[in-house]
């Protein structure tokens, strides 16, 4: 599993997108559970809190063919 990122072209300035390819929903759920209990990840997010606009988080699950 790998994660990559990109920015919108012609959309809102500064909007970033993260993409991770999971084999199935079970793998997605396991990955989310692991990241939400990883102390290092939580600390990193806390240190970068000023980079996020509160209330603007939006998750999407996309099926790519």
Image (spheres, rainbow, N blue to C red):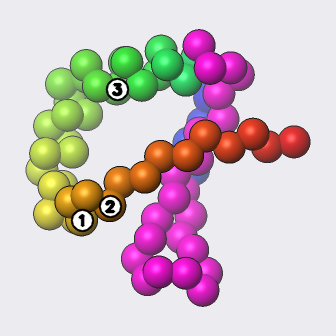
Q: Position of residue 4 (x, y in %)?
A: 57, 50
Tell me if residue 12 is in the magenta stretch.
Answer: yes
The quarter in which the N terminus is drawn is top right
The span picked out in magenta is: 5-26
Asked if marks 1 and 2 touch (Cβ < 8 Å), the reply is: yes
Q: Where is residue 34 in the image (x, y as percent from the top left)?
A: 37, 18
Taking 40 as reference, is 14 left or right? right
Q: Does the magenta stretch include residue 46?
A: no
| Mark pair 1, 3: CA separation | 20 Å
Distance from disc 3 to disc 2, alpha carbons, whole Å, reads 20 Å
Residue at image position (25%, 34%) is: 41
The relative height of residue 54 versus residue 10 in the rendered view (above or below) is: above
Q: Residue at x 75, y 39 (%)?
A: 63
Tell me, for residue 56, which label it has, or none.
2
Left or right: where 63 falls relative to 6: right
Q: Circle 2 sits in a helix, a strand or a loop, which is it?
A: loop
State the image quarter where residue 21 is shown. Answer: top right
Q: What element carries label 3?
A: helix
Residue at 59% across, 13% down: 26
Q: Earlier in the sequence, mark 3 or mark 2?
A: 3
| Front position in the image: 46 or 64 | 64
Q: Where does label 1 land, which residue?
A: 53
Give percent across and percent down for residue 8: 57, 74
Would residue 32 be seen by someone viewing this image from the given angle?
yes
């Amino acid at each position: 599993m790998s994660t990559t990122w990109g920015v919108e072209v012609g959309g809102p300035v500064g909007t970033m997108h993260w993409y991770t390819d999971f084999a199935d929903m079970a793998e997605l759920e396991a990955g989310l559970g692991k990241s939400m209990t990883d102390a290092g990840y939580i600390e990193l997010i806390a240190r970068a809190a000023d980079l996020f606009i509160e209330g603007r988080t939006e998750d999407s699950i996309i099926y790519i063919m």
